């Protein structure tokens, strides 16, 4: 953690000090600066409040933060909040939920909103009444209980005409009920295809990651002509390669948990240039099988294979195989576009 103070007698020019603040991302460091500095306090506060994340285990600190937001005068700290995330549980107090609701009304510049809330009623209780003052770019909702069909959730989503990324874990809203498929202009989606009734309307989704079991018949998947990146969670069943080729022929980057030898012939129908796998065959270093994959494709230039699939959340290292090159190289998994959904500001 950086230890740095500044006062009226400091030799550090204020302009340089404020520039340094912009490059500090650690919340603890920013808070220490806020407590120790005599100048630049407003700038530190704005940076500190730009991205806010709380867990139910820190409800006391969360309450203090919300009070500071609601009690701030000129300039209001709420204008600084760009990203807000809260993970609740069944014991979250109604008073805290009311504070959240009051604060959301003041977040006029909010861009990313993420909630992990145990049930739909709790989520609805914090939604701003009427049209919220912000225009979201990203919305994430994880709900463990409830059918997700409350009309108020749908009305809230329908107000977010600038929404580009929608992330629905577990139960998500039935967005077909208010014809949100005509309103949403998404480019990124994380969730289940069962929650995608707007697919027939050909929304311009470019990147999609499926996290839950597919509940639709393969023949019911409509084509998405704008889709470039498609991936599946390791624990999520996926369609056959033939189905992917039929319905998602525009995909250029494909991420799979594995590929089977009887599916190789169907790769020829895809125009992918990058294939990312958790494993290939029975041995991730089976170069003979890797060359067989290349032979069954025309456009494929690179294959990335996870170094270790023991931990499904570990994307730290991949082997990269290039067409015509017999020696793989190691690459950082965070740099792969197929892992875009991990790189969202979540």
Image (tube, rainbow, N blue to C red):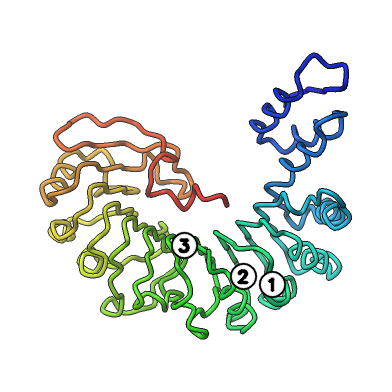
Helix or strand or loop: what does disc 2 sit on? strand
**Image point (60%, 63%), residue name:** 135
Q: Is residue 105 above or below residue 174?
A: above
* Residue at the disc numbered 1: 123
User: Taking 257 as reference, is 93 left or right?
Assistant: right
Quick one: quadrant of the N terminus? top right
Helix or strand or loop: what does disc 3 sit on? strand
Helix or strand or loop: what does disc 1 sit on? helix
Q: CA distance from mark 2 to mark 1?
A: 8 Å
* Residue at the disc numbered 3: 190
**Image point (45%, 65%), residue name:** 186
Q: Residue 282 at what x, y percent from top left?
A: 26, 48
Q: Which mark is residue 23?
A: none
Viewer-closest of 32 and 218: 32
Q: Residue 344 at what x, y percent from top left?
A: 51, 50
| Quadrant assignment, res 321 | top left
Point out the tag, 2 or 1, that comes first from the N-terminus: 1
Tags 2 and 1 touching, CB below 8 Å? yes
For the view shown, which residue lies furthest in the top direction?
A: 11
Viewer-closest of 241 and 49: 49
Tags 3 and 1 touching, CB below 8 Å? no
User: Taking 22 as reference, is 206 left or right?
Assistant: left
**Image point (54%, 66%), residue name:** 169
């Amino acid at each position: 953690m950086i230890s740095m103070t500044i006062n009226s007698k400091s030799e550090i020019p204020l302009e340089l000090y404020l520039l340094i603040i912009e490059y500090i991302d650690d919340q603890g460091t920013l808070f220490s600066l806020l407590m120790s500095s005599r100048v630049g306090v407003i700038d530190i506060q704005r940076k500190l409040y730009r991205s806010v994340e709380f867990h139910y285990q820190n409800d006391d600190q969360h309450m203090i933060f919300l009070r500071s937001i609601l009690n701030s005068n000129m300039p209001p700290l709420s204008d600084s909040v760009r990203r807000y995330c809260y993970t609740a549980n069944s014991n979250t107090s109604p008073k805290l939920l009311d504070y959240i609701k009051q604060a959301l009304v003041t977040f006029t510049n909010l861009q990313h909103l993420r909630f992990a809330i145990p049930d739909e009623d709790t989520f609805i209780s914090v939604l701003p009444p009427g049209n919220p003052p912000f225009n979201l770019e990203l919305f994430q909702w994880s709900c463990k209980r409830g059918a997700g069909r409350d009309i108020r959730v749908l009305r809230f989503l329908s107000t977010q005409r600038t929404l580009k990324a929608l992330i629905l874990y577990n139960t998500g809203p039935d967005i077909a009920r208010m014809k949100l498929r005509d309103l949403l202009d998404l480019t990124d989606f994380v969730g289940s295809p069962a929650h995608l009734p707007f697919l027939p309307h050909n929304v311009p989704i470019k990147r999609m990651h499926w996290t839950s079991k597919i509940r639709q018949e393969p023949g019911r998947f409509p084509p998405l002509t704008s889709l470039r990146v498609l991936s599946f969670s390791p624990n999520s069943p996926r369609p056959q390669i033939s189905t992917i080729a039929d319905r998602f022929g525009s995909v250029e980057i494909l991420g799979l948990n594995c590929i089977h030898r009887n599916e190789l012939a169907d790769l020829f129908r895809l125009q992918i240039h990058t294939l990312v796998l958790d494993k290939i065959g029975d041995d991730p270093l089976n170069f003979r099988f890797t060359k067989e994959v290349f032979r069954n494709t025309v456009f494929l230039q690179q294959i990335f294979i996870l170094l270790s699939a023991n931990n499904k959340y570990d994307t730290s290292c991949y082997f990269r195989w290039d067409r015509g090159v017999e020696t793989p190289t190691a690459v950082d998994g965070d740099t792969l576009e197929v892992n875009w959904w991990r790189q969202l500001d979540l």
